[in-house]
Amino acid sequence: MKKLATLLLFGLALAAPIAAVAAATDYDVVILNGRVMDPETQFDGVRNIGVKDGKIAAITKKKITGAETIDATGHVVAPGFIDTHSHSAGSEWGVKVQLRDGVTSQMDTELGSINVAGWYDEKKGKWRANYGTVEYSACAFWIR
């Protein structure tokens, strides 16, 4: 009985590192050593982020690995920003520039569009960021 117990403990000791490695590579993308900032929770600290199926699955100080690794040492990692007064919402080049600044949603809420449905149809499936506009008449008071 003592030998069986020892064998079981030895087997568990061997299995534990294997399970830890499997869990560690469980992410599609990992962002390592970035200064993670979240304005909503006011969190600010150097952490590693694990992304699985397009969603943040872990924010941790622990070492993690994944299929793709991004070294964010010296960089800020934060949620995408929203520009509610974007003149880039109508320009693919402008969208690229704003994406490099961390703006993932460009909204044209100043004058908007006369044909909102057409404005959305023009961008559907082609735009690299989130986008939005308002109906021109909703903002007509700016012109008066």
Image (spheres, helix red, strand yellow):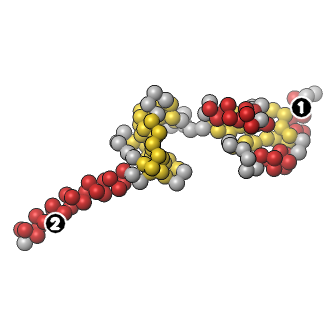
Residue 124 pos. (x, y %): 76, 50
Is residue 57 visible from the viewing direction of this image?
no
Return the mark for residue 141.
1
> Residue furthest toward the left?
2
The answer, for residue 76, to whether it is visible in the render is yes
Measure the C-alpha gap from mark 2 to mark 1: 77 Å
Q: In the image, what residue occupies the spot 41% across and 34% down?
A: 33
Q: Amino acid at mark 1?
A: Phe
* Mark 2 or 1: the one toward you: 2
Q: Which of the two discs, 2 and 1, labels the residue nearer the N terminus?
A: 2
Identify the image quadrant of the C terminus.
top right
70 relative to 1 in the view: left or right: right
Residue drawn at 21 percent across, 61 percent down? 12
Residue at 81% over, 50% down: 121
Q: What's the residue at 53%, 50% (across, down)?
A: 55
Q: Secondary structure at mark 2?
A: helix
User: Residue 127, image x and y in percent?
Assistant: 72, 44
Residue denoted by label 2: 8
Q: Quadrant of residue 129?
A: top right
**Camera-side residue of 139 and 1:** 1
**Residue 9 spot, x, y in % from top left:** 15, 62
Number of the label disc, if any, that sits on residue 81: none
- From the viewer's side, name the closer residue of 55 and 138: 55
